[in-house]
Image (cartoon, rainbow, N blue to C red):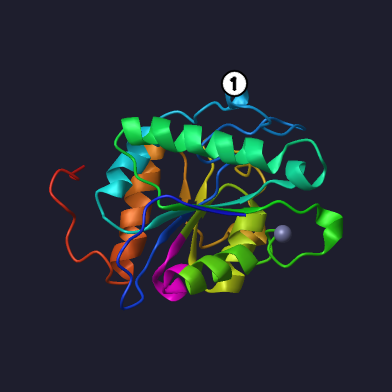
Amino acid sequence: MRILFERFSAAPAGPAIFIDRDGVINRRRPGDYVLEWSQFVFMPGIREALRRLSTLRLPMIVISNQAAVGKGLLEAAALKAMTVQLQEVLRGSGVVLNAYYYCTHRSDEGCDCRKPKPGLLRQAAAELNIDLPRSIFIGDADTDVQAARLAGCQPIMFDPECRYRTERADWMKNIATARDSDELVKFTVKCLQATSIVAAIPEGMSW
Ligand SMILES: [Zn+2]
């Protein structure tokens, strides 16, 4: 499912910041899905972090698995309504996300868009003219890192609860891992600078 809010000029193809939803923008609900807006709780500092990233003026696109739809727990229309509500609240905080791409399939459906598969990233890149090798994918799980790698973009881990701190697995080595939303902004900008996307840090983004 694709929900497009803000178009952007994309000729020639440019980089984007892809963002996972559950665990990055809002808290995960252990063992459960976010089925209604009242269950949507923002991660600490994430709105300010996204606002600062918005000043880079790169397309920002949410990439998220929402199998609750495929399981019949959440109507597609309700997911859409929740997304509109999220977009409104973020806009009030000065954050502009351009589009949301959801995989609504169950894991047993064998689709090619459910992360760790890279289908959603590739679809967004094709439809919105995005250069994947110069793009960043911010996620909170190994499946996000895998999807980023398969699509050829740079993974950044957001792990404020240190879920992976004790046993840092092989797949996490050499991946920038932000412990809070300030680090998330820093690492994202650093990563973009490494690929020469952001020549200079925009005004008002000093730290
Ligand atoms: Zn899918």
Q: Residue furthest top?
A: 38
Q: Which residues are magenta?
A: 128-136
- In depth, the one of 191 and 18 nearer the eye is 18
Q: Assign ligand 1 to one image quadrant.
A: bottom right
**Quarter of the view holding residue 123:** bottom right
In the image, 78: left or right of 95?
right
In the image, 4: left or right of 96?
right
- In depth, the one of 152 and 8 nearer the eye is 8
* Residue occupying the point 40% across, 52% down: 98
Q: Position of residue 188 (x, y in %)?
A: 37, 54
Q: Residue furthest bottom?
A: 12
User: What is the quadrant of the N terminus in the image?
Assistant: bottom right
Give yes or no for residue 196 being in the magenta stretch: no
* Residue occupying the point 33% across, 70% down: 10
* Badge 1: residue crowd in 10 Å (few <14, some 14–19, many ≥20): few
* Residue occupying the point 33% across, 63% down: 192
Disc 1 target residue = 38
What number of labels is visible? 1
User: What is the quadrant of the C terminus in the image?
Assistant: top left
